[in-house]
């Protein structure tokens, strides 16, 4: 990895917590951390254009290795000049390894030391992912940040199973690191270890020895209680290098996002804001609302008076309600614009709070405002 093209510059650490503010330098631009990253599974954030995503304040966005491999195929994306050219996004991008998607197949997959065999979702063909193959796919896709291939361990699981899986994931990480050749991509190691302190510590320490450009904390937000998730972070993060970015995978509710930042996490992602938007659930400064409710049929007020997004500046709840009940795609777009901007704006506030040494106060204020809704 060319370290002059990818590195984290820590500007300030909050005095009351471990929250960090900094600049992540990448080949496709510099972005502030901590950050929330919108997910574009199939090289698109559903219903939105790349220009709209940038206008909402996004830095890094994600694409999914597993899904892009199946459709349209990494060969086509490589021929197009990589993900950035293919989807016309001019900011930094990240691809996951497909480990979570393979994990979600469960009954359709077989894990061996060599890799994972599974069935193609679309045509039923057998597929086989090895650490080397996944790295090659990600190199062809061409994102700035790529992930090691790992097993996303189910919760709960026995110490014996988690130990064997974590050790195998570490061997896969080393194989992927050895296979990685592109100098313009940062390959992250992924910490596993389930809910067990000794295994999380071991995984983090062994990955740190491999000197990855960044590190992810995986195996979280898969059904475990919130306190267990936070323990998983705490068990691992103290062993990760302070000068490298730390990425908490798959969290999208405010309590998990801010709880991660409080512990020193720099990056997080989730499909939650766009998934909720497509089902009519909207995050607002007054709490979560379900726009399909009949009470919004004649509500001609703005969705959220504290929001600066295009949706809130131009449309009423009555119009959003109308679009939803008529199943109009424009409604899903407007809802998605708002939900993504809502989360990114909360994170922008978190960055300012860190710089002013008041992150804990900010976090407590935000979570108190949304109460038991867990930030949606």
Image (spheres, rainbow, N blue to C red):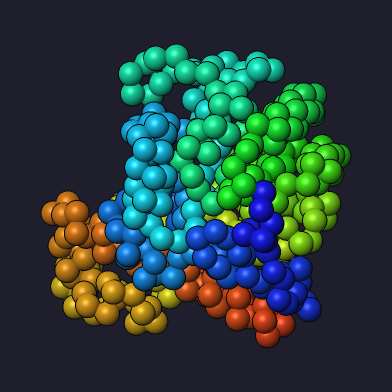
Q: Where on the picture, by quarter, is residue 371?
A: bottom right
Q: Where on the picture, by quarter, is residue 77?
A: top left
Instruction: Provide residue 85's location: percent of width, then percent of height.
Output: 36, 51
Is any part of residue 234 visible from this angle? no
Residue at the spot 23% in from the left edge and 71% down from the top edge: 317
Instruction: Provide residue 114's location: percent of width, then percent of height.
Output: 66, 17
Instruction: Provide residue 7's location: percent of width, then percent of height.
Output: 67, 61
**Measured along the vertical axis of the image, is residue 207 above or below residue 22?**
above
Residue at the spot 26% in from the left edge and 64% down from the top edge: 334
In this image, 244 relative to 201: left or right? left
Is any part of residue 80 visible from this angle? yes
In this image, 226 relative to 343: left or right? right
In this image, 177 relative to 44: left or right? right
**Measured along the vertical axis of the image, is residue 96 above or below residue 344?**
above
- Figure disc tally: 0
**Measured along the vertical axis of the image, is residue 313 above or below residue 7?**
below
- In this view of the protein, which residue sits in the foreground, 118 or 302? 118
Instruction: Provide residue 219's location: percent of width, then percent of height.
Output: 65, 40
- In this view of the protein, which residue sits in the foreground, 146 or 316? 146
Residue at the spot 45% in from the left edge and 14% down from the top edge: 126
Residue at the spot 52% in from the left edge and 65% down from the top edge: 29
């Amino acid at each position: 990895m060319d370290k002059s093209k990818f590195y984290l510059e820590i500007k300030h650490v909050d005095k009351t917590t471990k929250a960090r503010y900094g600049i992540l330098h990448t080949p496709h631009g510099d972005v502030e951390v901590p950050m929330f990253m919108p997910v574009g599974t199939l090289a698109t954030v559903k219903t939105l254009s790349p220009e709209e995503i940038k206008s909402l304040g996004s830095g890094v966005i994600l694409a999914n290795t597993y899904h892009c491999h199946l459709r349209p195929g990494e060969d086509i994306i490589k021929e197009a000049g990589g993900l950035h050219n293919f989807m016309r996004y001019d900011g930094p991008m990240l691809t996951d390894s497909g480990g979570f998607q393979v994990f979600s197949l469960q009954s359709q997959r077989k894990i061996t030391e060599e890799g994972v065999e599974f069935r193609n979702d679309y045509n039923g063909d057998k597929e086989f992912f090895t650490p080397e193959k996944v790295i090659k796919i990600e190199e062809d896709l061409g994102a700035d940040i790529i992930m090691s291939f790992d097993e996303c361990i189910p919760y709960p699981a026995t110490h014996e199973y988690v130990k064997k899986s974590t050790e195998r994931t570490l061997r896969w990480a080393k194989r992927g690191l050895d296979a990685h050749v592109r100098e313009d991509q940062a390959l992250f190691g992924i910490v596993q270890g389930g809910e067990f302190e000794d295994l999380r510590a071991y995984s983090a320490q062994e990955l740190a020895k491999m000197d990855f450009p960044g590190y992810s904390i995986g195996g979280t937000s898969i059904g475990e209680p919130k306190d267990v998730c936070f323990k998983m972070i705490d068990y691992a993060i103290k062993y990760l290098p302070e000068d490298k970015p730390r990425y908490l995978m798959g969290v999208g509710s405010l309590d998990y996002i801010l709880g991660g930042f409080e512990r020193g996490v720099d990056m997080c992602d989730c499909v939650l804001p766009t998934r909720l938007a497509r089902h009519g659930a909207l995050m607002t400064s007054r709490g979560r609302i379900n726009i399909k409710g009949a009470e919004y049929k004649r509500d001609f007020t703005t969705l959220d008076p504290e929001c600066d997004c295009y949706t809130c500046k131009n449309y009423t709840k009555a119009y959003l309600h109308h679009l939803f009940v008529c199943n109009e795609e424009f409604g899903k777009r407007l809802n998605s614009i708002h939900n993504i901007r809502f989360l990114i704006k909360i994170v922008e506030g978190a960055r300012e709070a860190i710089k002013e040494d008041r992150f804990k106060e900010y976090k407590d204020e935000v979570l108190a405002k949304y109460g038991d809704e867990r930030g949606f």
